[in-house]
Image (cartoon, rainbow, N blue to C red):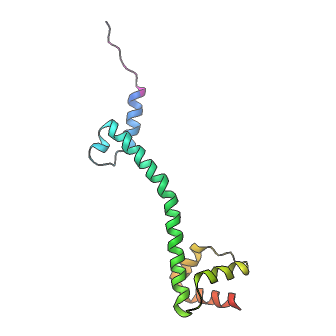
Amino acid sequence: MTRVKRGYIARRRRTKIRLFASSFRGAHSRLTRTITQQKMRALVSAYRDRGRQKRDFRRLWITRINAVTRENEVSYSYIRLIHNLYKRQLLLNRKILAQIAILNKNCLHIISKKIIK
């Protein structure tokens, strides 16, 4: 019986998976079955954490804005600032407001004073 030479398709698939897992440690980058398991796990984590990252950054921005707005005035808070921004139709998103709060606190205070009047 003659020897059957396997094609290159399976090898090409395995090398593609190995390239994905080349930075993993130990057996996670050497053994094919473990590599496929870790690849699935990594992709699931990446998908889940993309949404979580957006959520975490939004929370961080809100915390920063709230901290700066409460520094001078005790009664004024983040929610009032956002409400007044929407009332005045000033479309500054939370990311920009947080950057203003960090880099130039006086500017944020001026914005909040102008909105109140």
Residue 55 appears at what percent x and percent y?
52, 65
Q: Where is residue 69, by image quadrant? A: bottom right
Above or below 2: residue 49: below
Q: Position of residue 65 (x, y in %)?
A: 54, 80
Quadrant where the image shows the C terminus: bottom right
Q: Residue at x 31, y 43 (%)?
A: 29
Q: Is residue 95 above or below residue 24?
A: below
User: Measured from the top left, where is residue 35 in percent x and y?
Assistant: 35, 41
Q: Which residue of the protein is positioned furthest toward the left in this rendering?
A: 26
Q: Residue furthest front?
A: 75
Answer with left or right where residue 112 lies relative to residue 52: right
Q: Quadrant of residue 114?
A: bottom right
Question: Is residue 70 left or right of 30 when viewed as pictured?
Answer: right
Q: Whole-percent x and y of residue 77? A: 58, 85
Residue at 33% in and 40% down: 34
Q: Quadrant of residue 32?
A: top left
Q: Which residues are magenta?
A: 3-9
Magenta stretch secondary structure, dominant: loop
Q: Does residue 68 belong to the magenta stretch?
A: no
Residue at the right extreme?
88
Question: Residue at point 56% right, 93% down?
Answer: 73
